[in-house]
Image (cartoon, grey):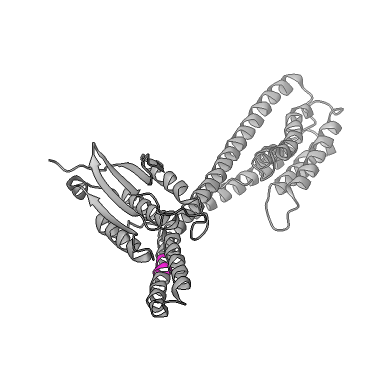
Amino acid sequence: MEPRLPLTPAVRRLVVISGVLAFAGAFVGDVFALSKSPVPSAPAAWLPLLVAGPLTGLATLETRWSPSLGKRVAVVTAVSLALTAWSLPWPAGTIQLSVLEMFGLLFLIFRTTTHRSRPAVAAALTLPLGVVTLLLPLRISRWPEIVGGEYVMTLTVAISISIGCALRALETRREHTIRETRQTERLALARDLHDLVAHHMTGIIVQANAALTIHAIAPDKVDPILRNIVDAGTETLESTRRLVRVLREDDHAAVRQGELLAELSDLIAAHSAASDDAGTAARLQATAAARTAHLGPEAEIAIHRLVQEALANVRRHASGTQAVVHVDAVSGRVRVSVTNTPAPHAVTRPLGGHGGYGLLGLRERIEALDGTLHAGPLPEGGWQVQAALPLTDLPAP
């Protein structure tokens, strides 16, 4: 897991340049310390500064030629641990600690903590680096300096691990948010596809079944039905195109915002025209408060989808019934209900098959707007779908 900080390219370049200068300065400091060493010719004095330091610095680089992080950690850990063990017998003051090696080990600890891998793998890479870093003060061979060095090393290792864990947690949360957002988008797409396309397909199937029924006894009535099917198919294609266009736009408003009742009237007219049963009809009842109520675009879309889904279900499950769409605004909420009379005959298999996702999508959409949805049979027969949504603004009386 690599940290993805929201930095501009200029800031990223500044960070990279600063890191290179810091490592270069550390190497220059190691060389200067070596020149001041009382026994610079001893291998124990120059190996940590001129071998372990540059090797650890190179291990921090990420290039196309770099070995995997695990291999680099293994090499750096083995070299650092070997030098620490080899320097223990040397007299006090012989060994100089490499600043470049310390910086490199701390940076590698940070990298392994934030590495894109399972937590157990990241911990397995970080643990040996932390151990060899904490053992660096043992090269000094003077107990007062060892105690102070261990304190400093423990503090810096803890800070490196803490920063790495914090960035790892942020990255995990970011990926979780991305997954949730994608899932939400997929659910929204599924709801919109169902709302915008399924009701058209239901009408097409109803009319196609009617054409199959009457083509032998009344062939002259098949042509109007076929033309209706063509019109419905064209409308379905346009609905799909509109959906794709809306999905591609970052900021879009409701279609025909503010004309909710006109859209509901169109839906009711299309519902009556799409059915092959003469008894199928629907009407709109809207109170004066509903006509002057102010609704947000999300609420308008939700009400439009509710009526659309309810009428589509009437055609599928209760063909030949009368439906009433009632819209009212009371106590700061708009209330919409779609009620149909009992079906004249039982439907063993709904036209278009069983879906089951329409009301589920409606409930999610309406509850997301702080609304409520109820659907169920009526005591005297029939079915009712009822929803209540908060008004964004009520006009002054």
Eyeballing the image, is 268 above or below 215? above
Q: Is residue 68 visible?
A: yes
Q: Is residue 181 magenta?
A: no
- At 45% across and 76% down in the image, what residue appears? 215
Eyeballing the image, is 171 above or below 249? above
Report the front residue among 265 and 366.
265
Residue 42 relative to residue 188: left or right = right
Residue 266, image x, y percentages: 29, 62
Q: Is residue 96 visible?
A: no
Residue 84 relative to residue 235: left or right = right
Which contiguous range is marked in magenta? 235-239
- At 59% across and 45% down in the image, what residue appears? 3
Report the front residue among 132 and 142.
132
Residue 77 relative to residue 195: left or right = right
Pick the quarter of the image with the C terminus.
top left
Most frequent secondary structure within the magenta stretch? helix
Residue 33, image x, y percentages: 71, 37
